[in-house]
Image: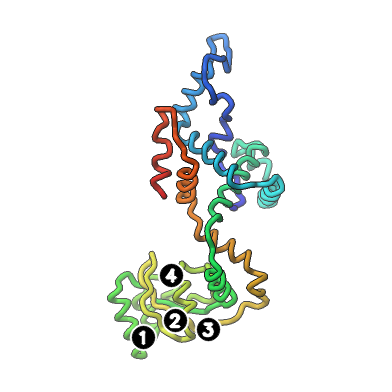
Amino acid sequence: MKKTLLALTFAASLGLAACSNPGDEVVVSTSVGNITQEEFYNSIKEIAGDQLLQQVVIEQILNDKYEVTDKEVDEELAAVKEQYGEGYEAAIAQSNLTEDMLKTNIRFSLLQEKATKDVEVTDEEIQKYYDQASQELNARHILVEDEALAKELVAKLKAGEDFAKLAKENSTDTGSAEKGGELGWFSVGTMVEQFNDAAYALEVDEISEPVKSDFGYHIIQVTEKRDVKDYGTLEEKKEEIRDAIAATKGDWNKKMAELIKEAKVEVKDKDLKGAFDGITSAE
């Protein structure tokens, strides 16, 4: 969880007691008239509407499926306090939060975190991650937009042309191009998945075929490999690796859509009928 002061959700700031069973009971009386539960409920619908309903339902579903202890919340709160130091009180005041409201936010964020980590991680994935994470690579690359150009450059490299020269002349990654494509040492998770897997599959000095990512086509050469000192055994690292893989596989929007579908959510209020349409379509 990123240790930062988040804007409080509608559900936490508005409260829900007055939203249930709206009727003629007076919520507030003033010299200029009363505000009934029904009026208050309708006002909340206008102000918060779909967003508030989503928040309330999702939090209820998460609380049913996952547990966040007071200890976990207190540990996260301590981390926030450590991050802000002497400026903590001023920071929560500036965010219009009380400490109790911040703890409500932290609890919900932890629930979200547990939901996104609730994905299947296989032993094969753990072994692959361990094999990669126990090594660091020193590599260089050439990045181009066009696959045909990438294949042409691979052919030139395999024919013996200079990698650094071709990187300077062709790579769209200007930061590394000036250094002959040099990326320096990196470990698993540093690069995008396609680049990472291709690089770790290479032998030292081997030239890759073009590797497509969202950035374009990479031509990769690993120049050195080294073991990570005192990385630990597979058994020692297994749970840590499982969490790391789950975090990368977790997709909050997709998970939320799955949870809502499983809970068989049916909105009875005609004004809020479409509250979950955008969410469930993300599955």
Q: Residues within 10 Å of mark 1 (few under 14, many from 20)?
A: some
Q: Are marks 2 and 4 in contact (CB under 8 Å)?
A: no
- Looking at the image, residue 185 sits to the left or right of residue 49; the answer is right
- In the rendered image, which residue does mark 3 sit on? 224
Dot 4 amino acid type: Gln
Q: Earlier in the sequence, mark 2 or mark 1?
A: 1
Give above or below for 113 relative to 215.
above
- Per the model, the C-alpha gap separating discs 1 and 3 is 18 Å
Q: Give the class, few, some or many, for how many residues have Cα within 10 Å of label 3's Cα (few <14, many ≥20).
A: some
Amino acid type of the residue tagged 1 in the rendering? Leu
The local secondary structure at tag 2 comes to: strand
Classify residue 106 by image quadrant: top right
Type of amino acid at the residue the image marks with label 2: Gln
Task: Tell me which numbered mark, 1 or 3, is placed earlier along the sequence.
Answer: 1
Q: Earlier in the sequence, mark 3 or mark 4?
A: 4
Q: Nearer the viewer, residue 96 or 28?
A: 28
* Residue position marked by numbered label 1 in the rendering: 157
- Report if the CB atoms under discs 2 and 1 are less than 8 Å apart: yes
Badge 1 element: helix
Would you place residue 243 above or below residue 9 in this image? below
Q: Which residue is mark 4?
A: 194
